[in-house]
Amino acid sequence: MPDKYDVFEKRCPMLGHAISFKYCRSVNSTTPCRKIMDCWFEQIPIRQYLEENFSIETIQNLLQPPKPKIVSLLEMIDQARASSQHSQT
Amino acid sequence: MNATKIFLNEQDMPRQWYNLAADFPKPMLPPLGPGGQPISPDMLAPVFPMNLIEQEVSSQRWIDIPEKVLEMYKLWRPSPLYRATRLEKFLGTPAKIFYKNEGVSPAGSHKPNTAIPQAYYNKEFGIKRLTTETGAGQWGSALSFACSLIGLECKVYMVRISFEQKPFRRLMMETWGGKCIPSPSTETNAGRKILQENPDTPGSLGIAISEAVEAAVTDPTGQTRYSLGSVLNHVMLHQTIIGLEAQKQLALAGIKKPDVVIACAGGGSNFAGLAFPFVNDKIHGAKIDIIPVEPSSCPTLTKAPFCYDFGDNAEMTPLLPMHSLGHKFVPPPIHAGGLRYHGMAPLVSHAAELGLITPRAIDQLECYEAAMIFARTEGFISAPETSHAIACAIQEAKKAKEEGKEKVILFNWSGHGLMDLTGYDAYMSGKLVNYPLPEEEIKKSTAVLKDLPKAAIKK
């Protein structure tokens, strides 16, 4: 679904190069990047945009900061093991 | 005539890393699991070799640097200590400003200081290949470089959109022999699942990390591990060679001790690298101001309480002791990508809580202005993160001028910004604005922490 803001571009602080708004709003398939609000609030009425296009639950999830690395690693170890076992059965 | 560069002979390079955890007046609090139990070393074994995990949990003060690592360090170490005489003259300050130039490494930053030993210890443990993730490619480059020297395979999962748009970083990795794979890939379950749902996905950093971890965990030979370039204790440890060298170089310049030590603080590794040896001096009586610098728009050390905080919205993940703005905090925008961690490295958080370091926040316009002054006096174009340290050094130099004191200021010039010039473009074209975080926002954000356990530390 094209969006009127998709033509906007800016530098992504995580990736280190220019990206379009389309990437930020759909990076996780159907959900936005967790940094979409802090990256785009200057150029777009981003809170209003999100409220019009995403569920309350999705917006609340966006308000969570990234997990500490060690915590993420433990989670990903478990996920990788579970996924591997599932694909073998 | 005063020397501009103070060199250390290779044979005088420090032969041990320094572990600050051994000298804390109060010991570190362990990270907690979901059940309130500390995270055990075994839990990390699928992704890191046990010799690195031992360093991660070590309380030994000095840890020998293996001879083979020292030999590889010699490619660019000891890094030069510069006297910033042109910057001093520009500022008209009586202060003596020194900076440690970590941009002289083959990868252009301090990152190889840990990439080399991580590759070495994995090789010693019998590991054949390392995996990691990268966005812009700085850490992927450093690890590819390290693996090429050590003789390990290196597989870097690079976010697909970056893979396509950042050919130079990708080419750096491939020049060093790293296998750079666009993520999501067909090599992992995580990647295949994403591609099945959305074949045209541009990828994300989260997917790339999942792929790198999965590749390590599920290798049936058990000869693959994952590598991380920030936050963890063993990464801080390896970086301390920066400060240990600086101590010797200052002595060669006739300086007994610096008055102020400064570095930017994102994941904490370049701050820890320069500062921790001086924190040791401070613990043992030296009077030194040690300043980690962070952006005023995303403070973690300067305005946040010290407590246990959850890492996720469901509050199911382990609790970690850290300075935190609360797990519901969303920082405003800033261009220094490496400085946007929710939680600081636990060792740095602990040092701040004990009053051993004095964090400072500086806004991004002042940082870019400082980087421009630095480029036009000292010549080097700084990474956006590095500009925070320069801005703080200039603040301190101006303060010394006002006070009429001949202070010695030392900061870490952690890397060049030649691959990150778009931020300079934005600054010079007037597109950057400041975003200080209002007190009201801080209070609202940290309100979620009030019911969590308080970290039991007394100064």
Image (cartoon, helix red, strand yellow):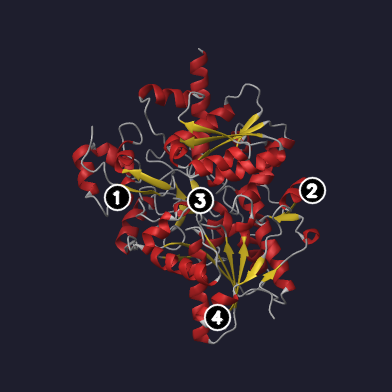
Amino acid type of disc 4? Answer: Lys
Q: Residues within 10 Å of mark 1 (few under 14, many from 20)?
A: some
User: Is residue B160 shown above or below B270?
Assistant: above
Mark 4 and mark 3 lie on one chain; the one further toward the N terminus is 4
* Label 1: chain letter: A
Q: Give the residue at mark 1.
A: A40
- Of helix, strand and loop, which one carries label 1? helix
- Of helix, strand and loop, which one carries label 4? helix
Are callouts 1 and 2 both on one chain? no
- Of helix, strand and loop, which one carries label 3? strand
CB within 8 Å, label 1 to label 4: no
Amino acid type of disc 1? Answer: Trp
Residue B367 in the image: x percent, y percent?
44, 65
Judge by depth and name the residue closer to the eye, B1 or B443: B1
Judge by depth and name the residue closer to the eye, B347 or B225: B225
Q: Give the residue at mark 2.
A: B67
CB within 8 Å, label 4 to label 3: no
Are callouts 3 and 1 both on one chain? no
Q: Residues within 10 Å of mark 3 (few under 14, many from 20)?
A: many
* Label 2: chain letter: B
Amino acid type of disc 2? Answer: Glu
Mark 2 and mark 4 lie on one chain; the one further toward the N terminus is 2
- Left or right of residue B273: residue A68: left
Quarter of the image containing the N terminus of chain B? bottom right
Q: Quadrant of residue A7?
A: top left
Q: Residues within 10 Å of mark 2 (few under 14, many from 20)?
A: few
Q: CA distance from mark 2 to mark 4?
A: 41 Å
User: Is residue B383 shown above or below B410?
Assistant: above
Q: Give the residue at mark 3.
A: B321
